[in-house]
Amino acid sequence: MEHYEKAETHRYNGPPEPHEVRVASRHSTKDIIQRAKQLLKEEEHQQVLLSGQGPTVVKATSCAEIIKRQHPDLHQVTSIQRARVEEIWKPKDSSQGLDDLKVERQIPAISILLCCAAPDPSTPGYQAPSEDTRPGHQGGKAKRTKTEGGSGGGGGKSKRKPKDSSKERTQEKSKERPKEGKERPKDGHKDGPKERPEET
């Protein structure tokens, strides 16, 4: 296939449904979501079908997740299948006398139905609205309460650390000990100078 280049691609999808949005590589995510939300608001539809094939499967899934975050009460039905495409390959150099090639391939495809009304729960691929994404749901996380002495409000009193009693004991012992190195008399006697006898 190094001497050929792909010229055309034919997809056998049939006509789109009235509430279908076919995701293509050239379509921006913003335009896809805007069109899908418009279909959800219309009374005659109140549902949207996002379909993607090949490289647009991931894009269709991402658009559906974004819409569900904005509308958490939507029901979802996902269908995964394979689609048939036909590719026309033409030679890069026509002077070599090579003929055109026709290649048929099977590529992955996905269809995601988002609807306001609840379908049959036994439908394959059905997914009910998630409780964690509903408005006002805390997601199972407990609220943090303010502790005493915290930064919020300053209503609580901060607990003082108990004084170290060992330091007080050492200070008291040092006071009770006699001071060493008392001054000695100048003459060197411990008991002081002796009285001289009177001269006769």
Image (cartoon, grey):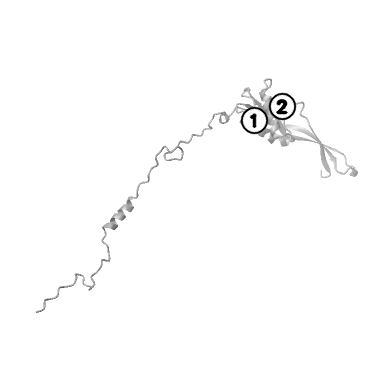
Q: Nearer the viewer, residue 144 or 180?
A: 180
Kindly identify which numbered label has been placed on residue 67: 1
Q: Quadrant of residue 76?
A: top right
- Tag 2 residue: 20
First of labels 1, 2 by sequence position = 2
Residue type marked 2: Glu
Q: Find the residue positioned furthest to the top.
A: 44
Looking at the figure, which quarter contains the N terminus? top right
Is residue 21 visible in the rendered structure shown here? yes
> Is 153 placed left or right of 62 in the picture?
left
Q: Are marks 1 and 2 in contact (CB under 8 Å)?
A: no
Q: Nearer the viewer, residue 15 or 66?
A: 66
**Regarding mark 2 in the picture, which secondary structure is present there?**
strand
Looking at the figure, which quarter contains the C terminus? bottom left
> Callout 2: 10 Å neighbours few (<14), some, many (20+)?
some
> Is 191 placed left or right of 60 in the picture?
left
Residue type marked 1: Ile
Residue drawn at x 29%, y 58% as measured from the top left:
174
